[in-house]
C-alpha cells in the first residue's frame, strides 16, 4: 500500500495490473470536496420517498423503493438556510428557513414554485396537519402562524397567541385539534380552533446538579393520548401530560443536547438523536409479560454518527438519521423487516449520486465542481517505470490551472469541460455560463461567451460532443437544446421539445462518439434516443421500473449501455432499436447475487477505445470492467477477488475466470475514467479528510485513551 | 454745523456705475429719483470751487446745501451697496435653486425605466425564483464609482424586467431581514458551539480514534499555529511565577 500524505496535494501514479490489462492509474486525492451537513429529513409514506435538506439549502429527494437512489435535487442558495421541511397534501414538499420564507418545490420541473414571506422573522419550525391541509410555522418573534394549503398555493389563515421567545419546534396532535410548541425553557399547548394557549409546561434547567443558562426545546411530539414528548438541550427526553400540564417521566440520555425526535405512525416507538452522535430507540412495552399496562422504555442505542444528529425520521420499517457529519443513515428495524435479506442492512449515504467531476481526455484535465466554484486541474506526469503495484514518483506535479467563482448566491447545478479542454460550461438555477479557454504555453486565458439566449436559463445536465463542436443542454423544462460552438461564439441549432404533456426534467445525457446519436433520460420516464443528423426522435428504450443512474454510448457499435438503480445493466443497440444478444443473455441468467446487493449506484460508464468487448463502470466503492466475451458468473463463483494476484498464473486465471473484473482498491471513488488506452484516472475522497474539515464534535471520554 | 470737506470727494460716480440699471426694483428706483431731486439744490448753489488755489487758508466754511448734498450722496452710496449685496444674494439663491432642480432630475430614473417598473407588478418579479437578487445600492455605488467621484446614487437599470436575471427589493426591508437572519444564525451557532457546549477539536477527536487503532497513523493535522503562541505564553507565565517565588524567599531570608 502506498503512503499518503493527507496534508498536501497527494497524487500517485501507480502501475497496477489487474483484470484484463495493465493500466497506469492517476490516483487523485486533491478534490477537496466536503458535503454540507444534513439539517432536516422528511419521510413521505405514500410515495416511500425521503426529502433531505442540507445546511447550504440543497434539498434532495431519495426514492427508498428504488434502492435508496437520490433521484432529484434542488440546488442550494446562500441565503436560504433551511430549518424545516415537510410534506403536505399528499406529495407536496414545503420548506422554511431563516430568511423567513416558506417555499414550495415543484417535483416535476425541479424548481421552486413560489416563495412566501411569513412576516414573522426567521422561521425555526414547520409542521403539516395530520390531514395535510394546513401548515403551521414557528417564527423568531414568537408567533405561530397557520396557513391553509390551497391547490395552487398556500394562504395565511391566522396567528396564534404570540409567545415571548422563538418557537423552535412544533407538533400537531394526531386529531388536528391541538398543537404543541417548544421554545426556550417552556412548552406551550395551543388550541387550534381558538388559537389560544391552554397549557404551559416549564422545563427544568438542571443537569446533574448544574444549572444551565437556558433549556432549549429542540423537538416536541404530540401523541394521540395527549402525551407530549420533548427533547431539550439539557440532555433529557421528557413525557408530559398535556391535559394537566405535569411531567410524567424523564429520561436523562446524554451529556449534551438531544436535538431531534420522530415518532412512528403507530405510536409504538420513537427515535431521538443526540449531539454526541447517538440515536436512541424508545419503544412502548408492557411492564410485565401478562399486564396490559405499557410504558416507554429506551431499547436500542445506535452510534452511526460522529457528530450531531440534527434530524431523525421514522419510517414504518427503519430509523433514518442525518446530521453535521453529512451521512444519511437508514437503519432498518429488524423486528419490522419480514424477509431477512440485504434490504435489512444498514445504509450510509455520504456522496451525491451524480457526478461532480468531468474530464478532458485530450489535455488530461479534470474539472471539479463545488457548491460555489469550479476548479480546473492538469494532471501530473511521470517518466519513471516500475513493476506491477509500484508507486511511481511524479516528474511533474499536478497544476491548479483555474479557480472559477460563481457570481451570486446560488449553487452550481452542473458543469462540464469539453474533450479538447477549451470550453467550460456550468449552470446555476437562474443562469447559464459558457467560457472559452485558450492555452498559450504555460498560461491560460478565459473568455466568457456573452449573450446567452433567453431559453438557456438553467440546465440540469450539460454535455459537450466528442469533437467539442456541439453543446447539449438539458433544461429543467424537459427540453433539450443543441448549440453549435464556433470560435468564441455559438449558434442555436435545434431544440427537442418534451413529449406532449410531460414537463419532467431530463437528468442524464449521453452522446455517441461519432456524434450521430444522443440519449437522454428523465427521472422516471424511459430513455429517449435522438437522431442528431435528422434532428428527430429515433426511438425510446422500453420502460423500466427503476431510475437510470448512468448512460453511455459505445464507439463504433453505437450500443447504449444503461445502468439502473437496482444495479441492472442493459445494453441496447441504437441502430437495431433492440436489446443486444449479450444483454438478453445477462437478463436470462441474471446478475450475481453480490452484484445486486451493492448499495451505491453506478455513476459513470465508459469504454476502451481498442477493446470493443469491454465496458468500464464504477460506483463509490468499486471499479469494474465487464468483458462481454467471457462467461457470466453464477451465484456459486467468486465475484470479488479478495487479494491482489501473486504470480503470473494467478493473473491469467483471473483474467479468464468470468466477465466481471472488480477492483476495490480505490474508495470512496468519486470518478474514474480512461484517459488513453493504458492510463486511468481515479478521483478518491477519503472520509477522514472530510471529517477534518467538519465543525468540532462533542467531547467524549473513551476508556483507555 | 461746520463740516470739513475731504480732499478727494468724487466717490459716488464709481458706485453708480457699478449698479446695474435693470436690477433695480421699482421702489429703489423711486428712492433714487427722490434722492436726486433732493440733491438738486446743492448742485445749484455750487459756487465754492474757487478756493482750490489757496491751500494755506483756514478750512472753509461749507454751505448748508453743500453739506446736505454730501450727506445725501453718502447715504445714497450706503443704500446702493446694500442693494447690491441683496441682488448678489438673490442671484446666488437663484443659482442654487436651479442646481437643486437639476440634481433632482438627475437622481430620478429615466422615464422609460420607471414606466416599466410600474407595469411589471411586484408579484410577477417575485414569482420567478431563479432571479438573482441584486442589491440596488451596491450596484449604484459601483456605477457611481466608475463614472464620477461624487457619491451620487444614480441608478441605471437597463431593461428592467426584460431579462429577469435579478430581483428588485426594497433595501430597508432587506437590511432588516438580513440582520434578523444573522442574529438567528448567531443564536443557533451559540447554542451548538458556544461556551456551554462541550466540544473538542477535530484533531483531538481524530487522534482519539488513532490511539485505539492497532496500527498508529500520523495525525490528520500536523500543525496548529496556536501552539507556538500558547507555549510562549506559558513560558512567560512560568518565568514570572518563578521569579516571584524566588523574590519572596529572598525577602524572607
Image (cartoon, coloured by chain):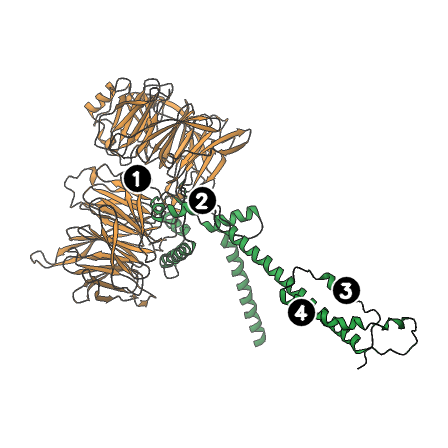
Label 2 or label 3, whichever comes before in sequence order: 3
Relative height, residue A489 to residue B37 (above, below)? above
**Horizontal relation, residue A674 to residue A577: left or right:** right
Q: Position of residue B2 (x, y in %)?
A: 81, 80
Q: Chain of mark 2?
A: B
Q: Position of residue A319 (x, y in %)?
A: 22, 47
Nearer the observer: mark 2 or 3; the answer is 3
Q: Position of residue A274 (x, y in %)?
A: 29, 54
Which residue is labeled 2 in the image?
A: B112
Label 3 or label 4, whichever comes before in sequence order: 3
Task: Indicate which disc residue A396 carries.
Answer: none
Crowding at dot 3, Cα within 10 Å, few <14 / some 14-19 / many 20+, comes out as few
Question: Do tags 2 and 3 sit on the same chain?
Answer: yes
Q: Colour of chain A?
A: orange
Q: Which one is in front, A478 or B42?
A: B42
Q: Chain of mark 4?
A: B
Q: Chain of mark 1?
A: A
**Horizontal relation, residue A315 to residue B93: left or right:** left
Determine which quarter of the picture holds residue B247.
bottom right
Q: CA distance from mark 3 to mark 1?
A: 89 Å
Q: Colour of chain B?
A: green
Nearer the observer: mark 2 or 4; the answer is 4
Query: Element type at marker 2?
Result: helix
Q: CA distance from mark 1 to mark 4?
A: 86 Å
Question: Do tags 2 and 4 sit on the same chain?
Answer: yes
Which residue is labeled 3 in the image?
A: B13
Question: Are discs 1 and 2 less than 8 Å apart at CB?
Answer: no
Which residue is labeled 1 in the image?
A: A110
Crowding at dot 1, Cα within 10 Å, few <14 / some 14-19 / many 20+, comes out as many
Which residue is labeled 4 in the image?
A: B31
Q: Residue at x 44, y 49 (%)?
A: B135
Amino acid at each position: 500500500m502506498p503512503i499518503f500524505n493527507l496534508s498536501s496535494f497527494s497524487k500517485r501514479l501507480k502501475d497496477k495490473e489487474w483484470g484484463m490489462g495493465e493500466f497506469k492509474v492517476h490516483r487523485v486525492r486533491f478534490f477537496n470536496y466536503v458535503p454540507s451537513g444534513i439539517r432536516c429529513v422528511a419521510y413521505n409514506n405514500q410515495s416511500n420517498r425521503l426529502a433531505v435538506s442540507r445546511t447550504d439549502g440543497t434539498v434532495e429527494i431519495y426514492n427508498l423503493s428504488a434502492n435508496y437512489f437520490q433521484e432529484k435535487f434542488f440546488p442550494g442558495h446562500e441565503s436560504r438556510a433551511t430549518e424545516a421541511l415537510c410534506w403536505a397534501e399528499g406529495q407536496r414538499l414545503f420548506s422554511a428557513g431563516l430568511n423567513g420564507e416558506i417555499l414550495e418545490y415543484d417535483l416535476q420541473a425541479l424548481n421552486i414554485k413560489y416563495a412566501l414571506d411569513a412576516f414573522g422573522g426567521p422561521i425555526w419550525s414547520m409542521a403539516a396537519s395530520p390531514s395535510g391541509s394546513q401548515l403551521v410555522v414557528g417564527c423568531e418573534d414568537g408567533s405561530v402562524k397557520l396557513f391553509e394549503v390551497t391547490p395552487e398555493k398556500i394562504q395565511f389563515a391566522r396567528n396564534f397567541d404570540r409567545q415571548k421567545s422563538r418557537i423552535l419546534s412544533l407538533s400537531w396532535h394526531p386529531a388536528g385539534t391541538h398543537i404543541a410548541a417548544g421554545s426556550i425553557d417552556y412548552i406551550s399547548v395551543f388550541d387550534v380552533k381558538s388559537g389560544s394557549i391552554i397549557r404551559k409546561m416549564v422545563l427544568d434547567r438542571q443537569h446533574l446538579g448544574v444549572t444551565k443558562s437556558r433549556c432549549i426545546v429542540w423537538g416536541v411530539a404530540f401523541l394521540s393520548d395527549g402525551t407530549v414528548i420533548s427533547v431539550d438541550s439539557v440532555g433529557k427526553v421528557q413525557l408530559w401530560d398535556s391535559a394537566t400540564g405535569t411531567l410524567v417521566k424523564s429520561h436523562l440520555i446524554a451529556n449534551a443536547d438531544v436535538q431531534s425526535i420522530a415518532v412512528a405512525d403507530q405510536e409504538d416507538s420513537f427515535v431521538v438523536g443526540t449531539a454526541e452522535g447517538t440515536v436512541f430507540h424508545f419503544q412502548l412495552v408492557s411492564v410485565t409479560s401478562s399486564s396490559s399496562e405499557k410504558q416507554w422504555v429506551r431499547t436500542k442505542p445506535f452510534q452511526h454518527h460522529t457528530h450531531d444528529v440534527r434530524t431523525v425520521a421514522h419510517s414504518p420499517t427503519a430509523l433514518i438519521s442525518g446530521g453535521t457529519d453529512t451521512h444519511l443513515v437508514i437503519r432498518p428495524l429488524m423486528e419490522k423487516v419480514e424477509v431477512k435479506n440485504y434490504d435489512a442492512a444498514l445504509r450510509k449515504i455520504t456522496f451525491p449520486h451524480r457526478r461532480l467531476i468531468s474530464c478532458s481526455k485530450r489535455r488530461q484535465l479534470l474539472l471539479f465542481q463545488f457548491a460555489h466554484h469550479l476548479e480546473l486541474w492538469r494532471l501530473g506526469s511521470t517518466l519513471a517505470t516500475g513493476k506491477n503495484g509500484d508507486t511511481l514518483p511524479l516528474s511533474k506535479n499536478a497544476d491548479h490551472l483555474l479557480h472559477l467563482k460563481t457570481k451570486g448566491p446560488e449553487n452550481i447545478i452542473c458543469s462540464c469541460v469539453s474533450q479538447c479542454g477549451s470550453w467550460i460550461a456550468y449552470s446555476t438555477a437562474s443562469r447559464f455560463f459558457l467560457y472559452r479557454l485558450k492555452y498559450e504555453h504555460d498560461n491560460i486565458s478565459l473568455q466568457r461567451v456573452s449573450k446567452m439566449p433567453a431559453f438557456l436559463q438553467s440546465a440540469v445536465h450539460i454535455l459537450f460532443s466528442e469533437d467539442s463542436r456541439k453543446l447539449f443542454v438539458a433544461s429543467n423544462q424537459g427540453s433539450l437544446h443543441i448549440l453549435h460552438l464556433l470560435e468564441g461564439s455559438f449558434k442555436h441549432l435545434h431544440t427537442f421539445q418534451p413529449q406532449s404533456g410531460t414537463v419532467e426534467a431530463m437528468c442524464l445525457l449521453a452522446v455517441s462518439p461519432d456524434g450521430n446519436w444522443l440519449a437522454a433520460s428523465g427521472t422516471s420516464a424511459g430513455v429517449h434516443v435522438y437522431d442528431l443528423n435528422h434532428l428527430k426522435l429515433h426511438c425510446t428504450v422500453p420502460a423500466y421500473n427503476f431510475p437510470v443512474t448512468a448512460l453511455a454510448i459505445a464507439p463504433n457499435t453505437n450500443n447504449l449501455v444503461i445502468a439502473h438503480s437496482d444495479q441492472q445493466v442493459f445494453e441496447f443497440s441504437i441502430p437495431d432499436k433492440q436489446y443486444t444478444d449479450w444483454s438478453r443473455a445477462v437478463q436470462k441468467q441474471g446478475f450475481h447475487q453480490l452484484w445486486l446487493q451493492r448499495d451505491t449506484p453506478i455513476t459513470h460508464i465508459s469504454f476502451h477505445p481498442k477493446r470493443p468487448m469491454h465496458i468500464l463502470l464504477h460506483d463509490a466503492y468499486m471499479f469494474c470492467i465487464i468483458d462481454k466475451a467471457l462467461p457470466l458468473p453464477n451465484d456459486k463463483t467468486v465475484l470479488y477477488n479478495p487479494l491482489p494476484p501473486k504470480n503470473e498464473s494467478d493473473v491469467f486465471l483471473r483474467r479468464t475466470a468470468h466477465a466481471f473484473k472488480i477492483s476495490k482498491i480505490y474508495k470512496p471513488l468519486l470518478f474514474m475514467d480512461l484517459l488513453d488506452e493504458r492510463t486511468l484516472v481515479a478521483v478518491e475522497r477519503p472520509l477522514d479528510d472530510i471529517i477534518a474539515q467538519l465543525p468540532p464534535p462533542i467531547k467524549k471520554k473513551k476508556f483507555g485513551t | 454745523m461746520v463740516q470739513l470737506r475731504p480732499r478727494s470727494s468724487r466717490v459716488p460716480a464709481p458706485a453708480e456705475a457699478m449698479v446695474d440699471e435693470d436690477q433695480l426694483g421699482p421702489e429703489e428706483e423711486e428712492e433714487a429719483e427722490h434722492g436726486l431731486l433732493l440733491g438738486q439744490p446743492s448742485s445749484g448753489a455750487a459756487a465754492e470751487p474757487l478756493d482750490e488755489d489757496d491751500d494755506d487758508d483756514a478750512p472753509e466754511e461749507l454751505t448748508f446745501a453743500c453739506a446736505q448734498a454730501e450727506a445725501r450722496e453718502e447715504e445714497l452710496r450706503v443704500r446702493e451697496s446694500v442693494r447690491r449685496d441683496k441682488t448678489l444674494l438673490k442671484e446666488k439663491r437663484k443659482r442654487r435653486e436651479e442646481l437643486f432642480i437639476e440634481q433632482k432630475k438627475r437622481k430620478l430614473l429615466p422615464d422609460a425605466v420607471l414606466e416599466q417598473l410600474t407595469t411589471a407588478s411586484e408579484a410577477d418579479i417575485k414569482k420567478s425564483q431563479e432571479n438573482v437578487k441584486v442589491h440596488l445600492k451596491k450596484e449604484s455605488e459601483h456605477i457611481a464609482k466608475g463614472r464620477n467621484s461624487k457619491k451620487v446614487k444614480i441608478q441605471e437599470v437597463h431593461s428592467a424586467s426584460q431579462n429577469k436575471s435579478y430581483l428588485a427589493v426594497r433595501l430597508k426591508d432587506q437590511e432588516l431581514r438580513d440582520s434578523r437572519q444573522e442574529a438567528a444564525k448567531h443564536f443557533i451557532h451559540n447554542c451548538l458551539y458556544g461556551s456551554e457546549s462541550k466540544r473538542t477539536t477535530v484533531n483531538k477527536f481524530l487522534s482519539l480514534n488513532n490511539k485505539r487503532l492497532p496500527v498508529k497513523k500520523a495525525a490528520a493535522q500536523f500543525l496548529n499555529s496556536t501552539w507556538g503562541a500558547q507555549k510562549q505564553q506559558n513560558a512567560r507565565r512560568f518565568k514570572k511565577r518563578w521569579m516571584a517565588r524566588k523574590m519572596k524567599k529572598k525577602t524572607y531570608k
